[in-house]
Image (cartoon, helix red, strand yellow):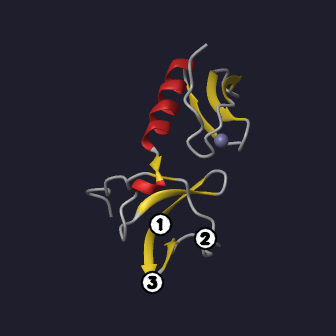
Amino acid sequence: MTNLKPCPFCGSAECEIFSRTSIEGRVLYDVVCHECGTLSGPWGSAERCAKHWNRRASLWQPIETAPKREYVLIPYGESIIIAGLFESHGGSEHWYAPHSGSPLLGRLPTHWMPLPEPLEGKG
Ligand SMILES: [Zn+2]
């Protein structure tokens, strides 16, 4: 069995590759986290599935290392990723996420990753 890194969202090691057959008859592979329900895939082989999962898992970094006052990606809820900014105002520090539709309600993210490169030549 292919080794999977812990879930990038909840840190659980209860992650597993499962296969299913698409309506076109292709066999597809996904990774599921049994702890938080995160689903990754589908991929055409179990090897690619594991490679992608593990690469993503290694992208997440501990929140203590996040840059201040700079947008980064943070997990929000079970399977949503948002852009957030760490701010400090008059002694209080919090995460600000303008596109989440609500404040972070005191919930502190545990991991972050850099924003992807902007699209070029679009629009
Ligand atoms: Zn998980």
Cβ atoms at labels 1 and 2 below 8 Å apart: yes
Q: Position of residue 121 (x, y in %)?
A: 26, 57
Name the quarter where the N terminus is drawn: top right
Q: Nearer the viewer, residue 63 or 81?
A: 63
Task: Please tell me whether mark 1 sits on a helix, a strand or a loop.
Answer: strand
Q: Residue at x 47, y 66 (%)?
A: 84
Q: Residue at x 63, y 45 (%)?
A: 10
Closer to the observer: label 3 or label 1?
3
Tell me the tag on residue 89.
3
First reached walking from the N terminus: tag 2 or tag 3: 3
Specify few, some or many for label 3: CA neighbours under 10 Å numbering under 14, 14-19, or 20 or more: few
First reached walking from the N terminus: tag 1 or tag 2: 1
Query: Which residue is the site of mark 2?
Result: 104
Q: Nearer the viewer, residue 70 or 115?
A: 70
Image height of 99 relative to 47, above or below: below
Query: Which residue is the site of mark 1?
Result: 84
Q: Residue at x 68, y 27 (%)?
A: 22
Name the quarter where the C terminus is drawn: bottom left
Task: Please tell me whether mark 2 sits on a helix, a strand or a loop.
Answer: loop
Image height of 64 relative to 88, above or below: above
| Residue type indicated by callout 2 | Leu
Q: Is mark 2 within 8 Å of ligand 1?
A: no
| Residue type indicated by callout 3 | His
Tell me the tag on residue 2.
none
Closer to the observer: label 2 or label 3?
3
